[in-house]
Image (cartoon, rainbow, N blue to C red):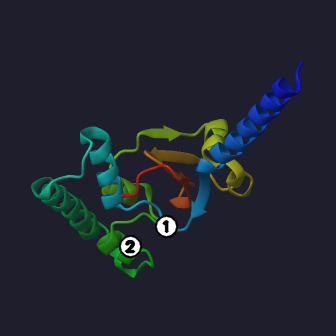
């Protein structure tokens, strides 16, 4: 084989290695103390379904529906006003550790996936699974990038798949 052939192969190997390293860094799974907000998921769903953000009327209709669900839940559960997560639930429409499954459904509606399979939950959590596995009973997946983990009482962990090439909403 000629020197040019070896050089070409070496260069190709280096390019592939660098590319593989870059691709590995595109998606990272981060554990966070704040979950998705209802608005962020609504925007992601709108882009996925329509290829655009919702117009004024669509957003107003959606906001009214979320407000009605939140107010109805608070009327039925006045004890939530004493909880530390009240502000996030009532004003920010955001999931936080301690949120109950019902609160998550009020804010985010039904998940795209629910699982009790430890292997699937470990795959979603990646490197964070070892510190979460003893507490977690179930995971709910909200596309494009969220997994919310529950024990018997409520949310115990939240992970977000962050991609450098994903759109920011």
Tell which circle, 2 or 1, labels the residue nearer the N-terminal end: 1
Is 113 placed left or right of 77 in the picture?
A: right
Percent coordinates x, y for residue 120 in the rendering: 61, 37
19 or 6, which is in the foreground?
A: 6
Query: Do the CB atoms of the residues marked 2 and 1 lie less than 8 Å apart?
Result: yes
- Image quadrant occupied by the C terminus: bottom left
Report how far apart the C-alphas of labels 2 and 1 lie in the structure.
9 Å
Residue pointed to by mark 1: 34
- Image quadrant occupied by the N terminus: top right
The image shows residue 66, relative to residue 141, as above or below, that is below
Look at 41% across and 40% down and name the residue there. Answer: 112
Image mark for residue 112:
none
> Around disc 1, counting alpha carbons within 10 Å, would you say few (fewer than 14), some (14 to 19), or many (20 or more)?
some
> Around disc 2, counting alpha carbons within 10 Å, would you say few (fewer than 14), some (14 to 19), or many (20 or more)?
some
Look at 88% across and 22% down and name the residue there. Answer: 2
6 or 71, which is in the foreground?
A: 6
Percent coordinates x, y for residue 33 in the rendering: 54, 68
SS class, disc 1? loop
Percent coordinates x, y for residue 34 in the rendering: 49, 67
Residue pointed to by mark 2: 88
Look at 10% across and 56% down and name the residue there. Answer: 57
19 or 113, which is in the foreground?
A: 19
């Amino acid at each position: 084989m000629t020197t040019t052939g070896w050089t070409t192969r070496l260069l190709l190997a280096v390019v592939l290695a660098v590319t593989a390293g870059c691709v590995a860094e595109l998606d990272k799974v981060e554990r966070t103390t704040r979950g998705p907000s209802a608005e962020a998921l609504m925007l992601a769903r709108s882009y996925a379904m329509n290829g655009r953000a919702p117009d004024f009327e669509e957003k107003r209709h959606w906001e009214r529906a979320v407000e009605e669900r939140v107010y109805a839940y608070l009327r039925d559960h006045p004890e939530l006003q004493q909880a530390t997560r009240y502000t996030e639930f009532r004003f920010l429409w955001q999931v936080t550790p301690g949120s109950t499954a019902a609160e998550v459904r009020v804010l985010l509606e039904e998940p795209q996936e629910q699982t009790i399979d430890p292997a699937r939950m470990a795959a979603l959590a990646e490197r964070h699974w070892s510190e979460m596995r003893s507490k977690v009973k179930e995971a709910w997946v909200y596309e494009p990038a969220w997994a919310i983990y529950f024990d018997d009482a409520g949310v115990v962990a939240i992970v977000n798949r962050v991609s450098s090439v994903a759109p920011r909403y």
